[in-house]
């Protein structure tokens, strides 16, 4: 069941609402569905790529021409501390997700981790889990009703960056 926050909507705006998939293709990835910017947000874990494809297809079919995508752009080098299988899974997920959107002709934008994380003041030089916790804390401060987790905070903060740049 997705977490969701909503503000007022009229039935007229629903028919022409722009829906943006914002995806963190990481090892334990997640995505958020943003309706009309940050007016309403739904969070999903990226557990099944088949379920993800079905979700993108059904959303695209219900809102033709009004679906957009944002994907975290994967770095070509993740550092010595990151195992190669993790880098491989990240790159494979990224390519698969990008292919789903491109195959449906959904416009895609990309943000590197450095770009979307730069405005988060509490990150500093933190690494690993300390960095993940700082991202989750920032997401919790901005979107307390969504109750962000370490797993889905990245996609939520990418969406925040995208709509507030």
Image (cartoon, rainbow, N blue to C red):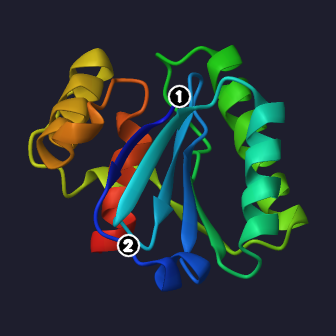
Identify the element where label 2 is drawn: loop
Mark 2: give few (<14), some (14-19) or many (20+) Cα within 10 Å. few
**Residue drawn at x 54%, y 35% as measured from the top left:** 44
Q: Quadrant of the C terminus?
A: bottom left
Res. 85 image quadrant? top right
Res. 86 image quadrant? top right
| Residue 98 visible, this angle | no
**Residue drawn at x 73%, y 36% as measured from the top left:** 93
Q: Position of residue 54 (x, y in %)?
A: 82, 44
Q: In this figure, which residue is indicated by the disc labeled 1?
A: 1
Closest to the observer: 156 or 124?
A: 156
> Eyeballing the image, is 134 above or below 6?
above
Q: CA distance from mark 1 to mark 2?
A: 21 Å
**Residue drawn at x 82%, y 66% as measured from the top left:** 61
**Residue drawn at x 74%, y 47% as measured from the top left:** 55
Q: Earlier in the sequence, mark 1 or mark 2?
A: 1
Q: In this figure, which residue is indicated by the disc labeled 2?
A: 9
Mark 1: give few (<14), some (14-19) or many (20+) Cα within 10 Å. few
- Closer to us: mark 1 or mark 2? 2
| Residue 116 visible, this angle | yes
Q: Position of residue 68 (x, y in %)?
A: 62, 71
Identify the element where label 1 is drawn: loop
Closest to the observer: 28 or 125?
A: 28
Q: How many marks?
A: 2
Q: Position of residue 133 (x, y in %)?
A: 22, 23
């Amino acid at each position: 069941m997705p977490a969701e926050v909503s503000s007022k909507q009229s039935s007229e705006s629903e028919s022409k609402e722009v829906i943006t998939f914002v995806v963190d293709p990481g090892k334990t990835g997640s995505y958020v569905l943003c309706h009309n910017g940050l007016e309403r947000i739904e969070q999903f874990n990226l557990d099944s790529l088949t379920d993800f494809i079905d979700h993108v297809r059904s959303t695209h079919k219900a809102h033709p021409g009004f679906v957009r995508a944002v994907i975290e752009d994967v770095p070509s080098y993740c550092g010595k501390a990151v195992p190669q299988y993790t880098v491989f899974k990240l790159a494979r997920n990224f390519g698969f997700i990008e292919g789903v959107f491109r195959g449906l002709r959904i416009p895609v934008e990309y943000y590197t981790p450095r770009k979307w994380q730069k405005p988060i003041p509490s990150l500093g030089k933190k690494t690993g889990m300390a960095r993940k916790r700082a991202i989750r804390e920032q997401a919790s401060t901005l979107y307390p009703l969504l109750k962000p987790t370490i797993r889905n905070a990245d996609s939520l903060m990418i969406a925040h960056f995208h709509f507030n740049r």
